[in-house]
Image (cartoon, rainbow, N blue to C red):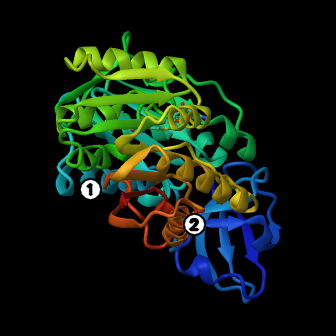
Amino acid sequence: MSEGRGSVTIRPRRARPFFARHPWVFVTSVERVEGSPGPGDEVDVFSHERQFIGRGLYNPHSAIRVRLYRWDDGPLDEAFWGNLFQRALSLRRDVLRLGGPGTAYRVVSSEGDGISGLTVDRYDRWLVAQFSSLALFEHRAPLGRLLAEQTGVEGILLRIDRSVAEAEGLRGAEDVLVGSAPAEPVVIDEHGLTYQVDLRGGQKTGFYLDQRENRRASARFCEGRRVLDLFCYNGGFALNALRHGGATHVLGIDSSAPAIEAARRNAVQNQLAHARFEVADVMPTLESLRARGERFDVVFCDPPKFARHARGLDDALKGYLRLNRAAVDVLAPNGLFVTCSCSGLIHRSLFADMIGQVAELSGRPIQIVEQRGQAPDHPVSASCLETDYLKCFLCRVG
Ligand code: SAH
């Protein structure tokens, strides 16, 4: 890894968040860059008064010009990354007690673990590394080697999030980074249910690990209930509702045909073949269910991210409102509505306001009985509250 030669000076009165250990130095905060650093090079970041703030990696192509990793003047060398990985691993192993054969969990959660731009998920004996920073991607070979050494896995696969890659100028192939890839889908166990996970072709890194605890927690309201699972992916909420909740019927809806095929396979594999899964677009489906007078006692609603940029926030809120309004319309009186948002830009209070608007528009009282977030292997960094991204509100709708 290269020497810390370049330096970045922050504009007047813009340095406060970086002293407070927020890792994203946006181009709009940068006054000047010296030493012509290239993509992935180390830079020192200084306040306008020339006070040293911290050290990070530079990306001339990204709006996030520097990602900060340390607030002293030590090097960003292998010992440093190795130490961050150790800390991340120890949280999962010693504190959260995750691990063991067939388990799946997030090993490194980007800013949540002080490693902005890298998420790593473990599926049994494999890791899937997803880079969202060009600068870290440039260092993928030594980082992959360190991860393999520390975890003892058989292989590490590389996945690239296309939308982020474009913003970062990250061009690379999805490949095997270390060791070998599994020949078959990997079978994982979560809450006593098994799932076949496609590490190469599945969405994200193959599975939505952040909803693990919410899938289980929601199930306890499903005894004897008819359940609708909107945006069901490979069936996690629905299968938990049947296995752990004692739901009588579940219907899962997702627009992705491979996701629904996987959901059906997972249902059969878990002897829950009475689960129904259909490939469909959620909004028109809700409209036809409503028109036919079909009602559910429990509705899960876990859409993909609506807000990608701050400028898209208003549209995203309108989208959540329309969707949540339509979902509540197929909920029986006093039904349970589990509604989620994985947009980090929509803060909890904004999300709660949106639910308040649903109450107003539908003319039905809504009580938020539980407010949840992402699973603890996706920790929230107190210095970067954008990491508190997943909202999962359990609501009773009168
Ligand atoms: N609840 C899931 C994760 C959902 S992720 C779990 O627990 O694993 C969001 C899902 O929404 C993806 O599977 C995606 O295929 C699906 N999706 C996106 N747009 C959709 C639409 N308009 N209608 C139905 N499904 C959609």
Q: Would you say residue 42 is visible in this rendering?
A: no
The percent coordinates of residue 329 (x first, y second) are 50, 48
Q: CA distance from mark 2 to mark 1?
A: 20 Å
Is residue 105 left or right of 23 when viewed as pictured? left
Q: Residue furthest top?
A: 183
Mark on residue 91? 1
397 or 274: nearer the eye?
397
Q: Would you say residue 12 is visible in this rendering?
A: yes
Question: In the picture, residue 397 is in which quadrant?
Answer: bottom left
The percent coordinates of residue 156 (x first, y second) are 42, 28
Q: Is mark 1 within 8 Å of ligand 1?
A: no
Tell which circle, 2 or 1, labels the residue nearer the N-terminal end: 2
Q: Residue at x 18, y 42 (%)?
A: 223
Tag 2–tag 1 contact (CB < 8 Å)? no
> Where is 2 relative to 157, above or below?
below
212 or 34: nearer the eye?
212
Mark on residue 23? 2
Amino acid residing under circle 2: Pro
Is residue 203 left or right of 150 when viewed as pictured? right
Label 2, residues with CA under 10 Å away: few <14, some 14-19, many ≥20: many
> Where is 352 relative to 154, above or below?
below
The percent coordinates of residue 208 (x first, y second) are 41, 38
